[in-house]
Image (cartoon, grey):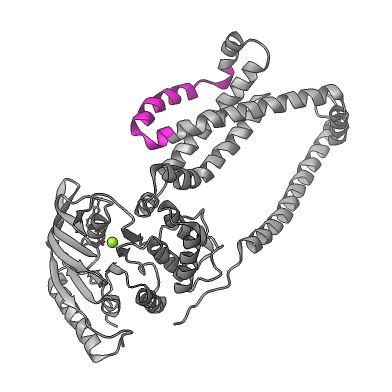
Amino acid sequence: MAINENKIYSPREKIVKNVGKGLAYNIMYKLITILLAGTVWYIASWRLNSDLLLPSPFTTARAFLNAITDEVVLKNISITMVRVFKGFGLSMAIGVPLGFLMGFSKIANNILGTLIDSIRQVPIMAWVPLTIIWLGLGDGPTIFLITMSGIFPVILNTITGVQNISKDYYNAAKTMGASRWSILKDIVVPATLPDIMVGARLAMSLGWMSVI
Amino acid sequence: MRLEINDISKSFINNGETHQVLKDISFTIEEGEFVTLLGPSGCGKTTLLTIIAGFQQAEEGEIVLNDKKVVAPGPDRGFVFQNYALFPWKTVRENILYPMKQLKVPKAEREKRLEELLKMAQLEGKGSLYPHQLSGGMKQRTAVIRALASRPQVLLMDEPLGAVDFQMRKDLQEQLEAMWIKDRTTVIMVTHDVDEAVYMSDRVILMSNEQGKILADLSIPLERPRDREGKKYTMYKQQLMDLLGNKTIKKKETIYQVV
Ligand SMILES: Nc1ncnc2c1ncn2[C@@H]1O[C@H](COP(=O)(O)OP(=O)(O)O)[C@@H](O)[C@H]1O
Ligand SMILES: [Mg+2]
Protein backbone atom coordinates (compact mmCIF):
# COMPACT_ATOMS: atom_id res chain seq x y z
CA MET A 1 0.00 0.00 0.00
CA ALA A 2 1.91 2.99 -1.22
CA ILE A 3 0.98 6.42 0.02
CA ASN A 4 2.48 9.09 -2.11
CA GLU A 5 2.21 12.44 -0.41
CA ASN A 6 4.11 15.63 -0.84
CA LYS A 7 5.58 17.49 2.09
CA ILE A 8 2.87 19.24 3.97
CA TYR A 9 3.43 22.30 6.09
CA SER A 10 1.77 22.47 9.47
CA PRO A 11 -0.66 25.39 9.80
CA ARG A 12 1.84 27.22 11.97
CA GLU A 13 4.79 26.77 9.66
CA LYS A 14 2.63 27.89 6.78
CA ILE A 15 1.34 30.99 8.50
CA VAL A 16 4.77 32.04 9.72
CA LYS A 17 6.29 31.42 6.31
CA ASN A 18 3.67 33.35 4.38
CA VAL A 19 3.21 36.19 6.83
CA GLY A 20 6.94 36.79 7.08
CA LYS A 21 7.31 36.97 3.34
CA GLY A 22 4.12 38.96 2.79
CA LEU A 23 4.99 41.57 5.38
CA ALA A 24 8.48 42.29 4.02
CA TYR A 25 7.15 42.63 0.47
CA ASN A 26 4.30 44.78 1.66
CA ILE A 27 6.58 47.23 3.43
CA MET A 28 8.91 47.36 0.46
CA TYR A 29 6.10 48.10 -2.00
CA LYS A 30 4.62 50.76 0.27
CA LEU A 31 8.02 52.47 0.61
CA ILE A 32 8.44 52.52 -3.15
CA THR A 33 5.01 54.05 -3.61
CA ILE A 34 5.64 56.74 -0.98
CA LEU A 35 9.02 57.57 -2.46
CA LEU A 36 7.68 57.88 -5.99
CA ALA A 37 4.69 59.99 -5.00
CA GLY A 38 6.89 62.18 -2.79
CA THR A 39 9.35 62.82 -5.59
CA VAL A 40 6.66 63.81 -8.07
CA TRP A 41 5.07 66.03 -5.44
CA TYR A 42 8.38 67.68 -4.57
CA ILE A 43 9.29 68.40 -8.19
CA ALA A 44 5.82 69.81 -8.89
CA SER A 45 5.89 72.13 -5.85
CA TRP A 46 9.43 73.25 -6.65
CA ARG A 47 8.38 74.22 -10.21
CA LEU A 48 5.24 76.02 -9.01
CA ASN A 49 7.08 77.56 -6.11
CA SER A 50 3.94 78.68 -4.29
CA ASP A 51 2.93 77.47 -0.84
CA LEU A 52 -0.65 78.44 -1.58
CA LEU A 53 -1.10 76.38 -4.74
CA LEU A 54 1.00 73.40 -3.73
CA PRO A 55 3.08 73.33 -0.56
CA SER A 56 6.15 71.10 -0.73
CA PRO A 57 6.06 67.70 1.00
CA PHE A 58 8.38 69.03 3.72
CA THR A 59 6.15 71.99 4.58
CA THR A 60 3.20 69.64 4.69
CA ALA A 61 5.01 67.17 6.91
CA ARG A 62 5.91 69.95 9.33
CA ALA A 63 2.28 71.12 9.46
CA PHE A 64 1.21 67.51 10.02
CA LEU A 65 3.61 67.11 12.92
CA ASN A 66 2.36 70.32 14.47
CA ALA A 67 -1.23 69.14 14.08
CA ILE A 68 -0.81 65.73 15.66
CA THR A 69 0.93 67.20 18.67
CA ASP A 70 -1.87 69.73 19.14
CA GLU A 71 -4.30 68.71 21.87
CA VAL A 72 -7.39 70.13 20.17
CA VAL A 73 -6.68 68.29 16.95
CA LEU A 74 -6.01 65.06 18.84
CA LYS A 75 -9.27 65.41 20.69
CA ASN A 76 -11.13 65.90 17.43
CA ILE A 77 -9.45 62.88 15.89
CA SER A 78 -10.52 60.74 18.81
CA ILE A 79 -14.11 62.02 18.54
CA THR A 80 -14.14 61.11 14.85
CA MET A 81 -12.71 57.68 15.56
CA VAL A 82 -15.36 56.94 18.14
CA ARG A 83 -18.04 58.00 15.66
CA VAL A 84 -16.63 55.82 12.91
CA PHE A 85 -16.50 52.80 15.22
CA LYS A 86 -20.03 53.40 16.45
CA GLY A 87 -21.35 53.76 12.90
CA PHE A 88 -19.40 50.73 11.77
CA GLY A 89 -20.69 48.70 14.71
CA LEU A 90 -24.25 49.67 13.89
CA SER A 91 -23.93 48.77 10.22
CA MET A 92 -22.56 45.34 11.21
CA ALA A 93 -25.16 44.82 13.94
CA ILE A 94 -28.03 45.59 11.58
CA GLY A 95 -26.50 44.49 8.27
CA VAL A 96 -25.35 40.97 9.19
CA PRO A 97 -28.69 39.70 10.55
CA LEU A 98 -30.56 41.35 7.66
CA GLY A 99 -28.15 39.71 5.23
CA PHE A 100 -28.73 36.29 6.82
CA LEU A 101 -32.49 36.76 6.68
CA MET A 102 -32.41 37.84 3.04
CA GLY A 103 -29.93 35.14 2.10
CA PHE A 104 -32.15 32.42 3.48
CA SER A 105 -35.62 33.64 2.61
CA LYS A 106 -36.62 34.45 -0.95
CA ILE A 107 -39.66 36.30 0.36
CA ALA A 108 -37.57 38.48 2.68
CA ASN A 109 -35.13 39.07 -0.14
CA ASN A 110 -37.88 40.22 -2.51
CA ILE A 111 -39.59 42.51 -0.01
CA LEU A 112 -36.51 43.99 1.66
CA GLY A 113 -34.46 43.93 -1.53
CA THR A 114 -36.69 46.46 -3.26
CA LEU A 115 -36.69 48.69 -0.20
CA ILE A 116 -32.94 48.48 0.25
CA ASP A 117 -32.24 49.10 -3.42
CA SER A 118 -34.26 52.31 -3.35
CA ILE A 119 -32.71 53.60 -0.12
CA ARG A 120 -29.29 52.80 -1.52
CA GLN A 121 -29.83 55.20 -4.43
CA VAL A 122 -30.08 58.22 -2.12
CA PRO A 123 -26.77 60.11 -2.30
CA ILE A 124 -25.18 60.08 1.12
CA MET A 125 -25.08 63.90 1.33
CA ALA A 126 -28.81 64.13 0.68
CA TRP A 127 -29.36 62.61 4.13
CA VAL A 128 -27.55 65.47 5.88
CA PRO A 129 -30.41 67.99 6.26
CA LEU A 130 -32.89 65.25 7.16
CA THR A 131 -30.69 63.69 9.81
CA ILE A 132 -30.01 67.07 11.39
CA ILE A 133 -33.76 67.57 11.72
CA TRP A 134 -34.24 64.03 13.03
CA LEU A 135 -31.24 63.67 15.30
CA GLY A 136 -30.22 67.22 16.12
CA LEU A 137 -26.63 68.50 15.93
CA GLY A 138 -24.27 66.27 18.05
CA ASP A 139 -22.95 62.85 17.15
CA GLY A 140 -26.25 61.60 15.76
CA PRO A 141 -26.13 62.71 12.12
CA THR A 142 -22.49 61.71 11.61
CA ILE A 143 -23.01 58.24 13.05
CA PHE A 144 -26.14 57.86 10.96
CA LEU A 145 -24.24 58.74 7.79
CA ILE A 146 -21.41 56.34 8.61
CA THR A 147 -23.92 53.58 9.28
CA MET A 148 -25.75 54.38 6.05
CA SER A 149 -22.61 54.19 3.95
CA GLY A 150 -21.41 50.95 5.55
CA ILE A 151 -24.60 48.97 5.89
CA PHE A 152 -25.20 48.13 2.22
CA PRO A 153 -21.91 46.40 1.48
CA VAL A 154 -22.39 44.45 4.71
CA ILE A 155 -25.91 43.34 3.74
CA LEU A 156 -25.02 42.50 0.14
CA ASN A 157 -21.87 40.55 0.99
CA THR A 158 -23.63 38.60 3.73
CA ILE A 159 -26.40 37.66 1.27
CA THR A 160 -23.83 36.50 -1.28
CA GLY A 161 -22.05 34.49 1.41
CA VAL A 162 -25.19 32.72 2.54
CA GLN A 163 -26.37 31.98 -0.98
CA ASN A 164 -23.02 30.58 -2.05
CA ILE A 165 -22.88 27.89 0.63
CA SER A 166 -22.70 24.55 -1.14
CA LYS A 167 -25.78 22.38 -0.71
CA ASP A 168 -23.40 19.52 0.05
CA TYR A 169 -22.46 21.14 3.37
CA TYR A 170 -26.10 21.20 4.48
CA ASN A 171 -26.66 17.63 3.33
CA ALA A 172 -23.43 16.46 4.95
CA ALA A 173 -24.44 18.03 8.26
CA LYS A 174 -27.89 16.45 8.05
CA THR A 175 -26.44 12.97 7.53
CA MET A 176 -24.47 13.62 10.72
CA GLY A 177 -27.61 14.28 12.71
CA ALA A 178 -27.04 18.04 13.00
CA SER A 179 -29.83 20.15 14.51
CA ARG A 180 -31.04 23.36 12.85
CA TRP A 181 -29.20 25.37 15.47
CA SER A 182 -25.96 23.53 14.84
CA ILE A 183 -26.32 23.99 11.09
CA LEU A 184 -26.62 27.74 11.63
CA LYS A 185 -23.81 27.97 14.18
CA ASP A 186 -21.34 25.40 12.84
CA ILE A 187 -21.99 25.53 9.09
CA VAL A 188 -23.69 28.73 7.94
CA VAL A 189 -21.81 31.24 10.08
CA PRO A 190 -18.27 29.96 9.45
CA ALA A 191 -19.03 29.40 5.75
CA THR A 192 -20.26 32.99 5.41
CA LEU A 193 -17.54 34.58 7.53
CA PRO A 194 -15.11 35.37 4.66
CA ASP A 195 -17.83 37.29 2.82
CA ILE A 196 -18.89 39.09 5.98
CA MET A 197 -15.27 40.19 6.41
CA VAL A 198 -15.26 41.61 2.87
CA GLY A 199 -18.38 43.58 3.74
CA ALA A 200 -16.83 44.75 7.00
CA ARG A 201 -13.69 46.03 5.28
CA LEU A 202 -15.73 47.99 2.77
CA ALA A 203 -17.94 49.37 5.54
CA MET A 204 -14.88 50.51 7.48
CA SER A 205 -13.29 52.36 4.58
CA LEU A 206 -16.59 53.88 3.42
CA GLY A 207 -17.18 54.95 7.01
CA TRP A 208 -13.90 56.88 7.10
CA MET A 209 -14.65 58.47 3.77
CA SER A 210 -18.07 59.69 4.78
CA VAL A 211 -16.92 61.59 7.89
CA ILE A 212 -15.21 64.29 5.85
CA MET B 1 -29.39 -4.08 8.50
CA ARG B 2 -31.67 -4.46 5.53
CA LEU B 3 -32.13 -1.80 2.87
CA GLU B 4 -34.95 -2.10 0.35
CA ILE B 5 -35.18 -0.02 -2.78
CA ASN B 6 -38.78 -0.47 -3.94
CA ASP B 7 -40.01 0.58 -7.39
CA ILE B 8 -38.21 3.91 -7.43
CA SER B 9 -39.06 6.22 -10.32
CA LYS B 10 -37.77 9.72 -10.92
CA SER B 11 -37.85 12.10 -13.86
CA PHE B 12 -36.56 15.58 -14.51
CA ILE B 13 -37.90 18.21 -16.85
CA ASN B 14 -35.14 19.89 -18.81
CA ASN B 15 -36.08 22.52 -21.41
CA GLY B 16 -39.70 21.41 -21.34
CA GLU B 17 -38.72 17.82 -22.10
CA THR B 18 -39.40 15.11 -19.53
CA HIS B 19 -36.44 12.85 -18.99
CA GLN B 20 -37.11 9.60 -17.15
CA VAL B 21 -33.92 8.99 -15.16
CA LEU B 22 -35.07 6.09 -12.97
CA LYS B 23 -37.92 3.72 -13.80
CA ASP B 24 -39.20 1.15 -11.30
CA ILE B 25 -35.82 0.42 -9.78
CA SER B 26 -35.90 -2.31 -7.13
CA PHE B 27 -33.26 -4.24 -5.22
CA THR B 28 -32.43 -5.23 -1.67
CA ILE B 29 -29.12 -4.86 0.13
CA GLU B 30 -28.09 -7.21 2.90
CA GLU B 31 -25.86 -6.65 5.90
CA GLY B 32 -22.15 -6.31 5.21
CA GLU B 33 -22.33 -6.22 1.42
CA PHE B 34 -20.12 -3.98 -0.68
CA VAL B 35 -22.40 -3.05 -3.56
CA THR B 36 -21.45 -0.94 -6.56
CA LEU B 37 -23.85 1.01 -8.75
CA LEU B 38 -22.14 0.96 -12.11
CA GLY B 39 -23.27 2.78 -15.22
CA PRO B 40 -22.35 5.39 -17.80
CA SER B 41 -22.23 9.05 -16.90
CA GLY B 42 -25.70 10.58 -16.67
CA CYS B 43 -27.57 7.31 -16.17
CA GLY B 44 -28.95 8.33 -12.80
CA LYS B 45 -26.51 6.81 -10.28
CA THR B 46 -26.14 9.98 -8.22
CA THR B 47 -29.89 10.56 -8.39
CA LEU B 48 -30.57 7.10 -6.98
CA LEU B 49 -27.90 7.41 -4.29
CA THR B 50 -29.18 10.80 -3.13
CA ILE B 51 -32.74 9.43 -2.99
CA ILE B 52 -31.47 6.66 -0.71
CA ALA B 53 -29.69 9.31 1.36
CA GLY B 54 -32.89 11.34 1.57
CA PHE B 55 -31.46 14.46 -0.09
CA GLN B 56 -34.26 14.30 -2.64
CA GLN B 57 -37.50 12.38 -2.99
CA ALA B 58 -38.59 9.87 -5.61
CA GLU B 59 -41.82 10.41 -7.51
CA GLU B 60 -42.85 6.82 -6.99
CA GLY B 61 -41.66 4.02 -4.79
CA GLU B 62 -39.97 4.04 -1.42
CA ILE B 63 -36.71 3.39 0.36
CA VAL B 64 -37.04 1.21 3.45
CA LEU B 65 -34.21 0.85 5.95
CA ASN B 66 -34.78 -1.73 8.68
CA ASP B 67 -38.55 -1.64 8.11
CA LYS B 68 -38.64 2.14 8.37
CA LYS B 69 -39.41 4.37 5.42
CA VAL B 70 -36.69 6.88 4.58
CA VAL B 71 -38.01 10.45 4.35
CA ALA B 72 -35.00 12.64 5.15
CA PRO B 73 -31.22 12.45 5.59
CA GLY B 74 -30.13 10.90 8.87
CA PRO B 75 -27.09 9.52 10.66
CA ASP B 76 -28.09 5.94 9.86
CA ARG B 77 -26.87 6.61 6.30
CA GLY B 78 -23.36 8.02 6.02
CA PHE B 79 -22.51 9.84 2.80
CA VAL B 80 -19.21 10.46 1.03
CA PHE B 81 -19.54 13.25 -1.50
CA GLN B 82 -17.84 13.26 -4.86
CA ASN B 83 -15.98 16.45 -3.88
CA TYR B 84 -15.68 15.22 -0.25
CA ALA B 85 -17.52 18.26 1.23
CA LEU B 86 -15.11 18.41 4.17
CA PHE B 87 -15.79 21.54 6.20
CA PRO B 88 -12.84 23.77 5.25
CA TRP B 89 -13.08 25.82 8.46
CA LYS B 90 -12.63 22.73 10.62
CA THR B 91 -9.50 20.65 11.07
CA VAL B 92 -9.47 16.94 10.20
CA ARG B 93 -10.04 16.21 13.87
CA GLU B 94 -12.96 18.64 14.18
CA ASN B 95 -14.50 17.32 10.97
CA ILE B 96 -14.51 13.79 12.36
CA LEU B 97 -15.66 14.77 15.84
CA TYR B 98 -18.55 16.85 14.50
CA PRO B 99 -20.97 13.97 13.73
CA MET B 100 -20.17 12.33 17.08
CA LYS B 101 -20.87 15.57 18.94
CA GLN B 102 -24.19 15.89 17.14
CA LEU B 103 -25.11 12.41 18.32
CA LYS B 104 -24.02 13.27 21.87
CA VAL B 105 -21.41 10.51 22.06
CA PRO B 106 -19.63 10.87 25.43
CA LYS B 107 -16.30 12.67 25.23
CA ALA B 108 -14.05 9.76 26.18
CA GLU B 109 -15.71 7.53 23.64
CA ARG B 110 -15.48 10.23 20.96
CA GLU B 111 -11.75 10.58 21.43
CA LYS B 112 -11.27 6.83 21.37
CA ARG B 113 -13.28 6.46 18.16
CA LEU B 114 -11.36 9.37 16.61
CA GLU B 115 -8.01 7.72 17.25
CA GLU B 116 -9.32 4.43 15.94
CA LEU B 117 -10.58 6.04 12.73
CA LEU B 118 -7.41 8.07 12.14
CA LYS B 119 -5.40 4.91 12.55
CA MET B 120 -7.62 2.99 10.17
CA ALA B 121 -7.21 5.71 7.53
CA GLN B 122 -3.47 6.08 8.12
CA LEU B 123 -3.98 9.66 9.18
CA GLU B 124 -2.37 9.47 12.60
CA GLY B 125 -0.84 12.81 13.51
CA LYS B 126 -2.74 14.63 10.75
CA GLY B 127 -5.67 15.59 12.97
CA SER B 128 -4.69 19.24 13.31
CA LEU B 129 -4.40 19.87 9.57
CA TYR B 130 -7.06 21.74 7.62
CA PRO B 131 -8.60 20.14 4.50
CA HIS B 132 -6.70 22.44 2.11
CA GLN B 133 -3.45 21.10 3.57
CA LEU B 134 -4.30 17.52 2.65
CA SER B 135 -3.44 15.62 -0.51
CA GLY B 136 -6.30 14.23 -2.61
CA GLY B 137 -5.98 10.79 -1.12
CA MET B 138 -5.90 12.09 2.45
CA LYS B 139 -9.02 14.17 1.80
CA GLN B 140 -10.77 11.13 0.45
CA ARG B 141 -9.86 9.01 3.47
CA THR B 142 -10.90 11.80 5.83
CA ALA B 143 -14.28 12.00 4.10
CA VAL B 144 -14.75 8.24 4.50
CA ILE B 145 -13.90 8.12 8.19
CA ARG B 146 -15.99 11.22 8.89
CA ALA B 147 -18.96 9.39 7.36
CA LEU B 148 -18.14 6.29 9.42
CA ALA B 149 -17.72 8.20 12.69
CA SER B 150 -21.38 7.98 13.62
CA ARG B 151 -21.42 4.23 12.89
CA PRO B 152 -24.04 4.39 10.12
CA GLN B 153 -26.03 1.34 9.06
CA VAL B 154 -24.96 1.88 5.49
CA LEU B 155 -22.25 3.99 3.87
CA LEU B 156 -23.17 5.70 0.59
CA MET B 157 -20.29 6.85 -1.59
CA ASP B 158 -20.68 8.87 -4.77
CA GLU B 159 -17.65 8.27 -7.01
CA PRO B 160 -15.31 8.63 -4.05
CA LEU B 161 -12.31 8.23 -6.34
CA GLY B 162 -13.73 10.17 -9.26
CA ALA B 163 -11.49 13.18 -8.76
CA VAL B 164 -8.27 11.17 -8.59
CA ASP B 165 -6.01 10.48 -11.56
CA PHE B 166 -5.74 7.02 -12.98
CA GLN B 167 -2.40 5.99 -11.47
CA MET B 168 -3.32 7.14 -7.98
CA ARG B 169 -6.73 5.56 -8.27
CA LYS B 170 -5.57 1.98 -7.91
CA ASP B 171 -3.61 2.78 -4.76
CA LEU B 172 -6.64 4.49 -3.30
CA GLN B 173 -8.91 1.60 -4.19
CA GLU B 174 -6.61 -0.65 -2.25
CA GLN B 175 -6.57 1.74 0.71
CA LEU B 176 -10.33 2.04 0.64
CA GLU B 177 -10.69 -1.71 0.52
CA ALA B 178 -8.29 -2.13 3.43
CA MET B 179 -10.37 0.32 5.46
CA TRP B 180 -13.56 -1.48 4.56
CA ILE B 181 -12.12 -4.86 5.53
CA LYS B 182 -11.48 -3.48 9.02
CA ASP B 183 -14.83 -1.74 9.33
CA ARG B 184 -17.25 -3.98 7.37
CA THR B 185 -20.03 -1.43 7.20
CA THR B 186 -22.50 -2.12 4.40
CA VAL B 187 -21.52 0.02 1.42
CA ILE B 188 -23.22 1.31 -1.71
CA MET B 189 -20.65 2.93 -3.96
CA VAL B 190 -21.29 4.70 -7.25
CA THR B 191 -18.73 4.44 -10.04
CA HIS B 192 -18.48 4.55 -13.81
CA ASP B 193 -15.23 2.56 -13.84
CA VAL B 194 -15.66 -1.15 -14.60
CA ASP B 195 -12.31 -2.14 -13.14
CA GLU B 196 -13.04 -0.29 -9.92
CA ALA B 197 -16.40 -2.04 -9.63
CA VAL B 198 -14.91 -5.50 -10.08
CA TYR B 199 -12.00 -4.77 -7.75
CA MET B 200 -14.08 -3.38 -4.90
CA SER B 201 -17.45 -5.06 -4.83
CA ASP B 202 -19.22 -8.20 -3.69
CA ARG B 203 -22.02 -7.27 -6.02
CA VAL B 204 -22.36 -4.99 -9.04
CA ILE B 205 -25.67 -3.43 -10.03
CA LEU B 206 -25.38 -2.31 -13.61
CA MET B 207 -27.57 0.60 -14.68
CA SER B 208 -28.55 1.42 -18.22
CA ASN B 209 -28.52 4.75 -19.92
CA GLU B 210 -31.66 4.24 -21.88
CA GLN B 211 -34.72 3.56 -19.77
CA GLY B 212 -33.38 4.17 -16.30
CA LYS B 213 -33.40 0.47 -15.62
CA ILE B 214 -31.14 -2.14 -14.11
CA LEU B 215 -29.30 -4.13 -16.77
CA ALA B 216 -27.70 -6.72 -14.54
CA ASP B 217 -27.18 -7.63 -10.90
CA LEU B 218 -23.92 -9.54 -10.70
CA SER B 219 -22.26 -11.23 -7.72
CA ILE B 220 -18.47 -11.20 -7.59
CA PRO B 221 -17.48 -13.87 -5.07
CA LEU B 222 -13.71 -13.47 -5.52
CA GLU B 223 -11.30 -13.50 -2.61
CA ARG B 224 -9.74 -10.24 -1.41
CA PRO B 225 -7.41 -8.63 -2.14
CA ARG B 226 -8.08 -9.36 -5.77
CA ASP B 227 -5.63 -10.01 -8.56
CA ARG B 228 -6.43 -7.57 -11.33
CA GLU B 229 -4.74 -9.85 -13.84
CA GLY B 230 -6.54 -12.98 -12.64
CA LYS B 231 -8.55 -15.07 -15.04
CA LYS B 232 -11.88 -14.82 -13.27
CA TYR B 233 -11.34 -11.13 -12.59
CA THR B 234 -10.87 -10.40 -16.29
CA MET B 235 -13.86 -12.54 -17.08
CA TYR B 236 -16.13 -10.49 -14.82
CA LYS B 237 -14.82 -7.32 -16.34
CA GLN B 238 -15.40 -8.58 -19.84
CA GLN B 239 -18.90 -9.65 -18.94
CA LEU B 240 -19.78 -6.20 -17.59
CA MET B 241 -18.24 -4.45 -20.55
CA ASP B 242 -20.17 -6.64 -22.97
CA LEU B 243 -23.39 -5.85 -21.18
CA LEU B 244 -22.61 -2.16 -21.31
CA GLY B 245 -21.36 -2.27 -24.87
CA ASN B 246 -24.57 -3.78 -26.19
CA LYS B 247 -26.63 -1.07 -24.66
CA THR B 248 -24.45 1.95 -25.12
CA ILE B 249 -23.00 1.32 -28.54
CA LYS B 250 -25.42 3.83 -30.04
CA LYS B 251 -24.10 6.53 -27.75
CA LYS B 252 -20.71 7.31 -29.15
CA GLU B 253 -19.02 8.43 -25.97
CA THR B 254 -17.86 5.27 -24.26
CA ILE B 255 -16.06 6.21 -21.15
CA TYR B 256 -14.84 2.79 -20.18
CA GLN B 257 -11.17 2.19 -20.18
CA VAL B 258 -10.06 -1.26 -21.20
CA VAL B 259 -7.08 -1.85 -19.03
N1 LIG C 1 -31.76 18.46 -10.30
C1 LIG C 1 -31.81 18.06 -11.58
N2 LIG C 1 -32.54 18.76 -12.48
C2 LIG C 1 -32.60 18.37 -13.76
N3 LIG C 1 -31.98 17.29 -14.27
C3 LIG C 1 -31.23 16.56 -13.42
C4 LIG C 1 -31.09 16.91 -12.04
N4 LIG C 1 -30.29 15.99 -11.45
C5 LIG C 1 -29.94 15.13 -12.42
N5 LIG C 1 -30.49 15.45 -13.61
C6 LIG C 1 -30.33 14.72 -14.86
O1 LIG C 1 -30.57 13.36 -14.61
C7 LIG C 1 -29.64 12.54 -15.29
C8 LIG C 1 -28.90 11.64 -14.31
O2 LIG C 1 -28.05 12.42 -13.49
P1 LIG C 1 -27.12 11.78 -12.39
O3 LIG C 1 -27.94 11.01 -11.45
O4 LIG C 1 -26.28 12.87 -11.83
O5 LIG C 1 -26.23 10.80 -13.28
P2 LIG C 1 -24.88 10.03 -12.91
O6 LIG C 1 -24.59 10.24 -11.47
O7 LIG C 1 -25.16 8.61 -13.26
O8 LIG C 1 -23.82 10.58 -13.80
C9 LIG C 1 -28.73 13.46 -16.07
O9 LIG C 1 -29.18 13.50 -17.40
C10 LIG C 1 -28.92 14.79 -15.40
O10 LIG C 1 -28.80 15.82 -16.33
MG1 LIG D 1 -22.92 11.22 -10.58
Q: Is residue B236 visible?
A: yes
Quadrant (top left, top right, bottom left, bottom right) of the N terminus of chain A: bottom left
Instruction: Relative to B36, say whether A2 is above or below.
Output: below
Q: Horizontal and vertical percent for residue B33?
A: 25, 72
Which residue is most to the bottom?
Answer: B231
Q: Position of residue B96 (x, y in %)?
A: 46, 60
Q: Residue furthest top?
A: A133
**Is A117 left or right of A45, judged from the image as shown?**
left
In the displayed structure, A7 sits above or below B56; it is below
Rendered residue at 11%/61% (across/down): B211
Q: Which residues are magenta?
A: A101-125
Asked if residue A26 is positioned above or below residue A129 in the image, the reply reads below
Main SS of residues in magenta: helix
- Which quadrant of the figure contains the C terminus of chain A? top right
Q: Position of residue A176 (x, y in %)?
A: 38, 54
Viewer-nearest residue: A22 or B161? B161
Would residue A189 be found to the left or right of residue B254 on screen?
right
Q: Quadrant of residue B40?
A: bottom left
Residue B48 point in image, percent of width and height: 22, 59
